[in-house]
Amino acid sequence: MAKTVMTADDSASVRQMVGFTLRQNGYEVVEAVDGQDALKKLEGTRVDMLITDLNMPNLDGIGLIKGARALPACKFMPIIMLTTESQDSKKSEGKAAGATGWIVKPFKPEQLIAVVKKVLG
């Protein structure tokens, strides 16, 4: 069975590109428009991995990670931050919240897939 990856990003073009790249490589994709939307969907959907933006309206990536980690099904799920932010302080904040890894935008599709394969095994 294909692994399911949720993408949370307020940019439709980023969601499209990430979704397209993942689907091309055999993954199922669930898209969320912000952290709040993602948390709602996480409660009713089995997801193997989460890729989230940092800066989003309603609930940002850090808030989403903290919320996801509070759900029993998401406690150990890999969570990757996909963001334009590259400062170490933001990375530490992401790691402290429970992020597994960090990809800086713009990214190459093969870079994304390499990370997904590495953390999903």
Image (tube, grey):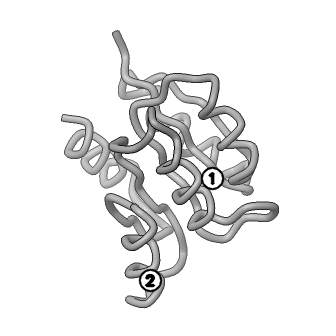
Q: Residue furthest right?
A: 58
Q: Do the residues labelled 1 and 2 touch (CB within 8 Å)?
A: no
Identify residue type, mark 1: Val
Q: How many labels does the image show?
A: 2
Does residue 116 sit above or below 48 in this rendering? below
> Residue 76 appears in which quarter of the rendering?
top left
Which badge, 1 or 2, comes first in the chain's sequence? Answer: 1
Q: Residues within 10 Å of mark 2 (few under 14, many from 20)?
A: few
Identify residue type, mark 2: Ser
Q: Where is residue 98 in the image (x, y as percent from the top left)?
A: 40, 62
Measuring 20% from the left and 45% from the top, which residue is drawn there? Answer: 118
Q: Depth check: give the residue in front, 47 or 21.
A: 47
Question: Which label lies toward us, 1 or 2?
Answer: 2
Q: Where is residue 83 in the image (x, y as percent from the top left)?
A: 53, 69
Does residue 92 sit above or below 47 in this rendering? below
Between the C-alphas of marks 1 and 2, the distance is 17 Å
Measuring 18% from the left and 35% from the top, which residue is drawn there? Answer: 121
Circle number at residue 14: 1
Q: Where is residue 90 in the image (x, y as percent from the top left)?
A: 47, 83
Q: How crowded is mark 1: few (under 14 residues within 10 Å), some or many (20 or more)?
A: some
Does residue 87 sit above or below 8 in this rendering? below
Q: Is mark 2 on a helix, strand or loop?
A: loop
Circle number at residue 82: none
Q: Badge 2 is on which residue?
A: 86
Q: Residue furthest top?
A: 1
Q: Where is residue 10 in the image (x, y as percent from the top left)?
A: 74, 56
Measuring 47% from the left and 27% from the top, which residue is drawn there? Answer: 23
User: Split into 4 quadrants, where in the image is the N terminus?
Assistant: top left
In the rendered structure, the answer to whether residue 70 lies left or right of residue 59 reads left
Q: Is mark 1 on a helix, strand or loop?
A: helix
